[in-house]
Image (cartoon, rainbow, N blue to C red):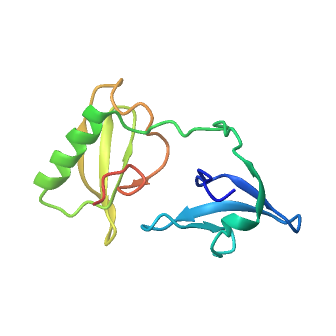
C-alpha cells in the first residue's frame, strides 16, 4: 500500500491495529498524524476518508459593503478606533484608552443588522490587519 493518496483528515489503520488521524502535510508531501509523527505508508492496512459535514456555521456579522464602509471610515478617522457597537440607528466607535465613544455615525436601520447589544473589536469583525 505504498502508492496511497493520503489526505489531511484521513484515518489510517496500521498492522498492529492502531489508528491515527492525518492532521498535517509538509511542503515535501509527507503526512503526519495527530501526535506529530511521520506516517509510515508501508505499515498501513486500511485507509478511511470520512465525509465531514458542517454542524454549525457562524453567521457573518458584516456584509462586504458594510466591511468596506467601516474600513474607509476607520482609515479616515481622526481617532484611533479599536471597537464599535450599534444602537438603534447609530454606530459608536471606541478607543481602548478612552472610556466613552470617540465618534459616532448615523446609519440606516437596515444597515449593520447583525451588530447589536455588545461592543465588537475590529478583529471580531474581520477588520484588523
Quadrant placement of the N terminus:
bottom right
Name the quadrant containing residue 110.
top left
Judge left or right: residue 32 versus residue 84.
Answer: right
In the depicted structure, whether residue 65 falls above or below residue 119: above
Q: Closest to the observer: 74 or 31?
A: 31
Residue 65: image x %, image y %?
A: 25, 32
Above/below status of 19 relative to 61: below
**Rendered residue at 34%/69% (across/down):** 96
Relative to 106, residue 20 above or below: below
Image coords of residue 46 (percent x, y): 78, 52
Return the residue nearer the eye: 33 or 89.
Answer: 33
Q: Residue at x 67, y 40 (%)?
A: 52
Instruction: State the residue lying farthest toward the right.
Output: 17
Q: Quadrant of residue 82?
A: bottom left
Mark count: 0
Residue 35, how many percent across, how many down?
69, 74
Q: In which quadrant of the rendered view does residue 58 lie? A: top right
What residue is at 48 percent from the left and 68 percent from the top? 26
Name the residue at 43% across, 53% down: 124
> Looking at the image, is 48 positioned above or below residue 38?
above
Quadrant position of the C terminus in the picture: bottom left
Q: Nearer the viewer, residue 15 or 48?
A: 15
Amino acid at each position: 500500500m505504498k502508492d496511497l493518496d493520503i489526505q489531511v483528515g484521513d484515518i489510517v489503520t496500521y498492522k498492529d491495529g492502531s489508528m491515527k488521524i492525518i492532521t498535517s502535510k509538509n511542503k515535501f508531501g509527507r503526512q503526519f498524524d495527530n501526535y506529530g509523527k511521520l506516517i509510515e505508508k508501508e505499515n498501513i492496512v486500511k485507509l478511511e476518508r470520512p465525509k465531514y459535514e458542517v454542524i454549525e456555521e457562524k453567521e457573518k456579522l458584516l456584509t462586504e459593503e458594510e466591511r468596506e464602509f467601516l474600513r474607509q471610515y476607520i482609515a479616515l478617522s481622526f481617532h484611533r478606533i479599536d471597537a464599535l457597537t450599534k444602537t438603534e440607528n447609530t454606530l459608536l466607535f471606541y478607543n481602548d484608552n478612552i472610556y466613552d465613544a470617540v465618534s459616532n455615525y448615523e446609519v440606516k436601520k437596515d444597515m449593520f443588522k447583525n451588530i447589536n447589544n455588545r461592543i465588537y473589536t475590529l478583529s471580531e469583525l474581520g477588520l484588523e490587519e
